[in-house]
Amino acid sequence: MAYTYDNEGNLIDMDMKLPETKRKPVRKPNAVPPKTKTIIKAQSGGPVKPVVRKENLNERIQRMTYQYDGKPNDKPPPHYNNPYIIDEENYGKRPKPFDNNDPSTYPSDRDQRQKLNTWDLILETSKGDKEQMKEIRQTLNEEYKRNGKKFLSDKELKIIGRHPVQQIKLPEVNIPSSITNTTPPKVQVPEKSLDQIIKEKADARLKREQEAYDKEYGVGGIPKILRPE
């Protein structure tokens, strides 16, 4: 069910106007939007939470005609000052960060006022709307890229996962000093090359064969011809 305000400042059901017996006088003027005279009580006894909505096509035509073609004494359309019916250009848009040198950031600016009055409500009511929440996240991520978390509230930071409590802290790993100080074992490099070792063994073998041959056949003469070389 959607709720809005009539021309007299009463909060009403947009789908079905409730009888006067269902309306309750406002006892806390500061707890409701300006000029609200009565509110509709929910079944629980509490006040009905108003629903923010975008202006429809007919309302948009009326507003733009009044803004751009209207005469100075023309009255605004009935919905024009309704705090919960938002211009299409302002709907779902985040308020500008306040800048003392920029009048468009003042609450007196109608566009800024619409955004200020509805942004928090849109954040709450959009939790079940995937498409709208996607647009909200995109808006907040763009603001985060421009200015970091300077102008973002805790609620907005949590929506985009940038709040300090959401940041993952990796556990510190302490490496034992015995591991860090261990030097690799030295690789023993042979002093002689493989070819040199093979040659020396072959020469030693030849020498033993020659000595055995000389001992058996003697030195010189004909036996010298067959001596191992």
Image: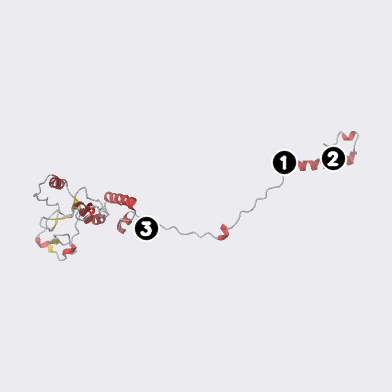
Asked if the residues shown at circle 3 and circle 2 are in contact, with their CB atoms under 8 angstroms apart, the answer is no
Q: Which residue is mark 2?
A: 210
Q: Position of residue 23 (x, y in %)?
A: 12, 62
Q: Quadrant of the C terminus?
A: top right
Q: Position of residue 195 (x, y in %)?
A: 72, 41
Mark 3 neighbour class, 10 Å CA radius: few under 14, some 14 to 19, many 20 or more: few
**1 or 2: mark nearer the eye:** 1
* Amino acid marked by disc 2: Gln
Residue 195 badge: 1
In the picture as drawn, the residue positioned furthest to the front comes out as: 101
Q: Secondary structure at mark 1?
A: helix
Measuring 13% from the left and 63% from the top, which residue is drawn there?
24
Q: Position of residue 14 (x, y in %)?
A: 14, 54
* Amino acid marked by disc 3: Gln
Q: Which image quadrant for residue 48?
A: bottom left
Q: Secondary structure at mark 2?
A: helix
In the picture as drawn, the residue positioned furthest to the left comes out as: 73
Report how far apart the C-alphas of labels 3 and 2 lie in the structure.
88 Å
Asked if the residues shown at circle 3 and circle 1 are in contact, with their CB atoms under 8 angstroms apart, the answer is no
Q: Quadrant of the N terminus?
A: bottom left
**Residue nearer the viewer, 111 or 92:** 111
Between discs 3 and 1, the one toward the N terminus: 3
